[in-house]
């Protein structure tokens, strides 16, 4: 479903305006797969642009690697924002770095540490793996916004009823912060990191 969504966005004749993708649970997984697929198409798009600049003829036939991609829009210009809630996927840092490059605006991961259904499901499915789950933990990748909704989501099924509140919490649809606001946020986060570091160092010296 994610691959089909990506292809429909690429070859859509309904206009060229950017879209916002929002999903929870399996819907979030579709959004995630769509973004991953768009990163692959972005690589092909860049290859096509390079070939065009060199005057190389491109084969868009079924036998070629660029089948059906004639008139494809730039994948990186399609998705403005993406909000994923309770994403049932193991955390893969490399994939998140890739999809961060394909989303022009905000990339948001909403998670709940109290989502036991998601946790137990993955433990039973892959007992030997101890990788973190996106829907129950933050994604530590630059440019990814992590929103803890543990106070709202006590069970995976709660997402059905709390989507509106979560979207309000992430300020969905509100104007993007200006440069001054972003600088202020960075300073606050920096102060937190420094404070944690100093506290840790003092604790080590004391012990």
Image (tube, grey):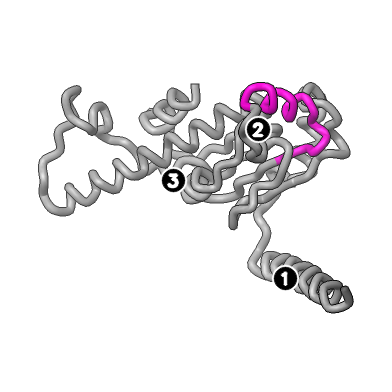
Question: Does the rendering let one see residue 67?
Answer: yes
Q: Which residue is mark 3?
A: 77
Q: Mark 2 or mark 3: which comes first in sequence?
A: 3
Q: Quadrant of the C terminus?
A: bottom right
Which of these two is toward me, 72 or 156? Answer: 156
Q: Which mark, residue 190?
A: 1
Q: Which mark, residue 87?
A: 2
Q: Mark 1 or mark 3: which comes first in sequence?
A: 3
Choose top left, top right, bottom left or bottom right for residue 84: top right
Disc nearest the viewer among 1 and 3:
1
Residue at x 73% of width, y 65% of height:
185
Q: Residues within 10 Å of mark 1 (few under 14, many from 20)?
A: few
Q: Mark 2 or mark 1: which comes first in sequence?
A: 2
**Label 3: which secondary element:** helix
Cβ atoms at labels 2 and 3 below 8 Å apart: no
Residue at x 70% of width, y 43% of height:
172
The correct choice, above or below, for 44 with respect to 64 in the image is below
The correct choice, above or below, for 203 with respect to 128 in the image is below
Image coords of residue 12 (percent x, y): 40, 28
**Label 2: which secondary element:** loop
Magenta extent: 110-126
Image coords of residue 145 (percent x, y): 67, 50
Residue at x 54% of width, y 45% of height:
96
| Left or right: 201, with 86 as reference point | right
Q: Residues within 10 Å of mark 3 (few under 14, many from 20)?
A: some
Q: Does 117 appear in magenta?
A: yes
Which of these two is toward me, 174 or 168? Answer: 168
Q: In whole angstroms, how far apart are the C-alphas of marks 2 and 1?
A: 28 Å
Disc nearest the viewer among 2 and 3:
2
The correct choice, above or below, for 5 with respect to 95 in the image is above
Question: Does the rendering let one see residue 184?
Answer: no
Image coords of residue 137 (percent x, y): 72, 42
């Amino acid at each position: 479903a994610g691959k089909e969504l990506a292809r429909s966005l690429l070859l859509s004749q309904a206009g060229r305006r950017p879209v916002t993708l929002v999903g929870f649970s399996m819907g979030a997984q579709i959004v995630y797969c769509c973004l991953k697929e768009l990163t692959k198409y972005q690589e092909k798009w860049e290859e096509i642009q390079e070939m065009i600049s060199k005057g190389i003829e491109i084969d868009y036939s079924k036998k070629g690697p660029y089948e059906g991609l004639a008139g494809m829009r730039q994948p990186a210009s399609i998705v403005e924002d993406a909000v994923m809630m309770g994403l049932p996927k193991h955390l893969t840092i490399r994939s998140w770095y890739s999809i961060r490059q394909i989303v022009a605006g905000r990339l948001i991961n909403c998670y709940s540490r109290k989502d036991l259904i998601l946790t137990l499901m993955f433990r039973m499915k892959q007992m030997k793996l101890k990788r973190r789950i996106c829907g129950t933990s933050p994604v530590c990748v630059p440019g990814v916004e992590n929103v803890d909704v543990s106070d709202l989501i006590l069970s995976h099924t709660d997402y059905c009823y709390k989507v509106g509140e979560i979207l309000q919490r992430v300020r969905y649809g509100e104007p993007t912060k200006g440069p001054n606001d972003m600088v202020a946020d960075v300073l606050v986060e920096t102060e937190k990191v420094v404070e944690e570091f100093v506290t840790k160092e003092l604790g080590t010296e004391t012990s």
